[in-house]
Image (tube, rainbow, N blue to C red):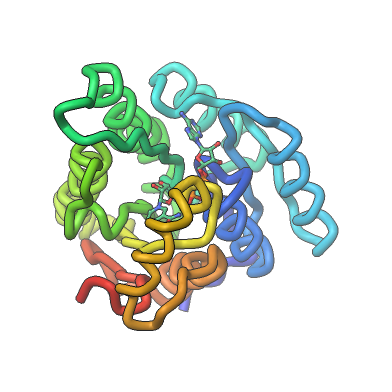
């Protein structure tokens, strides 16, 4: 079992939803957390304050991870502030749902940039530091949509499936180094992203979930901490946390 005390993590998009839950769960386990956010600094500062209240350390850094210069700034600031980096959680993501016929080139490129190219951006600058850690972890928050597809989600599904292929390939390349690379594929989790879905569609989704409910952000965070703590021999995997919706 890895000793997580005083390890350092970056959670992209850590200011709300699943990212905030992951940040708090890491902090509860003694990890110092860099909360990345793109806009709405007040949300990131709220998570930092909540983490400090539980006696751990956190630091907020603004960076648009779809921009490679911003990603470099994020990793540099994190390492300067906490003196190293052990865990990278690529969680930032957006949707721009539209059927393919209505999808603009901008809808396509923006979703690929934020959800997939961001992973290249952050990993490129984080990797040298992760390789120096004795508990290096890369955890990519993919989606059930990357596995099963989703109506009106060609852009999002392509990005999230891309994350899974990237996870497996990088896991192979890094296996000997001890840095593990895994993906978590959440089902439908009760955050702003899912709250934005029209009520009638939300109801029809819940009806299809074998456990008949949306997941909670903390249920994804538990998967992240499991991989960090007990995941020494787990690499290149997809951990499905979806109430049985995709098996
Ligand atoms: P959310 O919309 O509540 O939060 C997304 C986070 O990403 C926010 O903190 C936002 O500020 C950040 N972000 C967006 N663009 C960014 C950028 N360019 N740079 C930096 N940060 C940026 O969504 P959520 O539901 O918490 O989703 C978190 C992750 O989980 C996403 O990758 C999402 O695709 C994935 N996911 C969510 C669900 C779900 O049902 N909620 C299901 C499967 C996968």
Q: Position of residue 98 (x, y in %)?
A: 27, 34
In what quadrant of the picture does the C terminus appear? bottom left
Going by the image, does 6 lie left or right of 109? right
Q: Position of residue 189 (x, y in %)?
A: 46, 62
Q: Position of residue 227 (x, y in %)?
A: 41, 69
Q: Residue at x 37, y 71 (%)?
A: 241
Q: Is residue 107 visible in the rendered structure shown here?
A: yes
Q: Position of residue 231 (x, y in %)?
A: 37, 73
Residue that sits furthest to the right in the current view: 53
Number of labels in the image equals: 0
Q: Is residue 87 visible in the rendered structure shown here?
A: no
* Along the viewing direction, whichever of 211 and 175 lies nearer the viewer: 211
Q: Residue at x 56, y 59 (%)?
A: 22
Going by the image, does 222 lie left or right of 138? right
Q: Residue at x 18, y 41 (%)?
A: 158
7 above or below 63?
below
Q: Residue at x 61, y 47 (%)?
A: 16
37 above or below 139?
above
109 above or below 172?
above
* Along the viewing direction, whichever of 80 and 246 lies nearer the viewer: 246
Residue that sits furthest to the bottom in the current view: 211
Q: Quadrant of residue 211?
A: bottom left
* Along the viewing direction, whichever of 83 and 194 lies nearer the viewer: 194
Q: Quadrant of residue 81?
A: top right
């Amino acid at each position: 079992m890895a000793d997580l005390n005083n390890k350092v993590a970056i959670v992209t998009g850590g200011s709300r939803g699943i990212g905030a839950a992951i940040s708090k769960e890491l902090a509860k386990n003694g990890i110092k957390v860099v909360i990345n956010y793109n806009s709405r600094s007040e949300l990131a500062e709220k998570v930092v304050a909540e983490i400090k209240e539980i006696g751990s350390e956190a630091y907020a850094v603004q960076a648009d991870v779809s921009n490679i210069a911003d990603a470099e700034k994020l990793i540099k600031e994190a390492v300067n502030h906490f003196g190293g980096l052990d865990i990278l959680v690529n969680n930032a993501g957006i949707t721009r749902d539209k059927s393919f016929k209505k999808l603009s080139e901008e809808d396509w490129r923006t979703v690929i940039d934020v959800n997939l190219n961001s992973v290249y951006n952050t990993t490129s600058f984080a990797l040298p530091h992760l390789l120096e850690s004795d508990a290096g972890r890369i955890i990519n928050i993919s989606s059930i949509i990357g596995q099963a597809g989703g109506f009106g989600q060609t852009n999002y599904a392509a990005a999230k499936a891309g994350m899974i292929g990237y996870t497996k390939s990088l896991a192979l390349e890094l296996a000997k180094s001890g840095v593990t690379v895994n993906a978590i594929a959440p089902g439908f989790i009760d955050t702003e992203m899912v709250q934005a879905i029209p009520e009638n569609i939300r109801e029809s989704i819940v009806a299809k979930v074998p456990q008949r409910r949306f997941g909670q952000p903390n249920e994804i965070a538990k998967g992240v901490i499991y991989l960090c703590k007990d995941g020494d021999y787990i690499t290149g995997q997809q951990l499905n946390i979806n109430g049985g919706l995709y098996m």
